[in-house]
Image: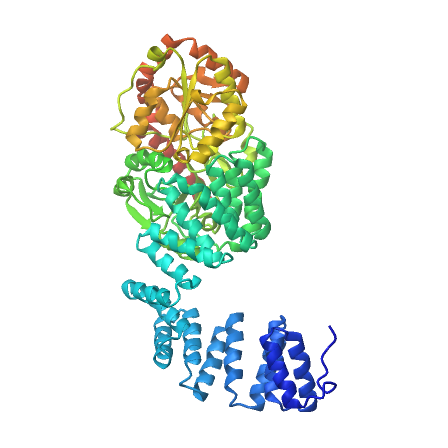
Amino acid sequence: MNPIHFENMKLNINEAFQLAIELLSKERFWDVVNICQQITAIQPDHYRAHHGIGLGLHRTGKTTEGIAQIKMAIAINPEYFSAYNNLGNILRETGDLEEALEAYLKAETLQPTTPVIQHNIGSVLKDMNRTEEALLRFRAAIELDPNYFDALLGTALCLHKIGEIEEANSAYQHLLRLKPDHPDALYSLATLMKEIDQPKIAYELYCKAIEVMPEMYDAHLAKANLLSEQVNMGMDWAQEEALDSYRKASDLKPEDHSTHITIGNLLLAKGETDDALDEFRRAILLKPHSNIARSCLLMGLQYHPGPTLAELYKESLLWQVNCSSEISRKSDHLNSRDPNRRIKIGYVSADLRMHPVGFYLLPALYHHSTDKFEVYCYSNSKETDIFTERLRSYADKWRDIVDLNDNELHDLIVNDGIDILVDLSGHTGGNRLLVFASKPAPVQVSWIGFFFTTGIKEIDYILMDATAVPDGEECYFTEKVIRLPETRFCYEPPKTAPEIVSPPALKNGYITFGSFNNLAKVTPDVIKAWAQIMRSTPNSRIILKSHVLGNNHVKIRIAGQFAAEGISQERLDLRGVSPHIKMLAEYGDMDIALDPFPFNGGLTSCEALWMGVPVLTVFGNRPIARQSAGFLKTIGLEGFIAKDVQDCCNLAIKWSNNISELTLIRDGLRQKMNSSLLCNGKLFTENLEKAYRDMWREWCLH
């Protein structure tokens, strides 16, 4: 388009400027700049033209030059209200809040009774988290103009932020009476409804906001988060819609790496491992230094059968290489180097509750020698239950750390004088690995929560056992591998567990396999192997139980995968979540538990064995793939450890044809467990404490 020359159009300067204003309203910004520059070339002190150039340049992406032009307009005419106001608007957009406020306040001195300037001052104060001051300004704007909608909305938002919930609710309702389809009001009221535990109303309001403004990223994301919370509470119907909403949010804001992480975790929970890993890798491409994205990838890879130990190790090293810039300062360790004194042990976890980590930690906390060890627990979660209280009662000191940033937690650990800091999370959710990488304690250990190297050189040791890490595999760990005798786990069976019942095959006339593992572990390769077992054992059935199997979409997908392997739906029993005691009783419905691979069961395997159900496992190529084999070796049940999938199928056939021996095994399993180190909390903790003491003495010598 050819540039406009207003002189050729026989326009004078005033007429040219009016044309520029008209073009500004039509968003023809380059034409505005062009005309106003012609005006200033003829009349350099035409402050309105400089202002027009500034607005046009800003809207074409040349914000710095635009600000300079608006400041020139102000220099020519220091009483120019619009220039100060628009300068404030631009500076607020760019995040220069202090300068924006200064510009607005100057505009206020010129026109103090203008509603828009009171609103704008309120808006920038709200952005600066000076909420109560902002509220006063919004109310001042409303006094000047009672129908000023944006000021009414600002008032509602401020009331909401300072916790005046009833007033905020009334304010939002008033806004929606004025404008029933206003997306920001719908979204904000939805958020308030979610906060006061009205998820159904919140969901409906988010949906309406999206209907009014389909491109509203915040509404899609908030709706997805709301649905995801319902999934976590057992409302599995919400899972597919949550995924759909996250994907729509991601389409609207593809540069947000965190949405890809969330999508990946939802896919992983459904057992769609390949797609989950793709999402984690997308997140890393967007933000290479994201420790959370890299931890999610490392966790996700443990579910995938493909990577070798060497490949897993190489990927683990990348966490520290890429996240080192996020690590806070290191500490000089001034702990007393007395090798025989009472040691302060600190356990850090987001899972100090009814969770596998909590179950496995409990015996050690209970049996720790209080005269030799002082135990601190650092809980990185707001989620608590009755099991949390049991754990808390066995700790000398309990610290809730979820609201502490990494530097604050580092300082707390240093001030507590922790000698040995134990990470119980690894790369699982809620970890505080950045703190471990800052080395707040002289000796640092990885145990229970993760099953491979963390890749972090500041973590000195990892507690394993000889089954998980055979001789020669230490090279795949940045930590020094310490092998506890027989097992790295200690299981305390629930006192309320139901009694063992006879194998159901005795009354059914066919064998029933089963797995109550997280469905994330049940990959297509696992289903293919289990289908092979079922084809080799005529009339056999399989029970799968997982919280996501309450989702009909997931049931259809799993049934379809079995059907593709020749196993009809009648042979499948797909069950959703149930209370823990009822779930334990359901082990009475199966004869043999099938262990997923490469990600074996942990607590699930222990519970199956305690309920008399032997676990058939494949000895794999990494620690997590040897976990159940470790339990079976510890209790003397090596006959259920297969060397590969074909061997697993052969063992399944063998045991399916020997119900009488299965019955004997079932009857004696609790006694086997009770008499093993797996359930001997006192002896296990003595071994654990010996390992801690050896680590401590090693540090004291150097």
Rendered view: 13 above or below 590: below
* Snapshot colouring: rainbow
Q: x, y percentage for residue 137?
A: 37, 77
Q: Position of residue 483 (x, y in %)?
A: 45, 30
- x and y percent of residue 502 in the render? 31, 14
Question: Which residue is found at the position 55% from the left and 46% from the top?
Answer: 319
Viewer-nearest residue: 330 or 192: 192
Q: Is the N terminus in the top left, top right, bottom left or bottom right quadrant?
A: bottom right
Q: Is residue 387 left or right of residue 557?
A: left
For the point 42% across and 34% down, the residue is 552
Placement of 529 over or under 263, stated as above or below: above
Is 151 left or right of 305, judged from the image as shown?
Answer: left
Q: Is residue 139 visible?
A: yes
Position in image of residue 364 (x %, y %): 33, 35
Q: Is residue 684 above or below residue 40?
A: above
Residue ID at (37%, 26%): 606
Residue at image position (49%, 34%) is 271
Foreground residue among 297 and 379: 297
Q: Is residue 164 above or below residue 57?
A: above
Count the marks: 0
Question: Can residue 493 be seen here?
Answer: no
User: Depth check: 589 or 99 in front?
Assistant: 589
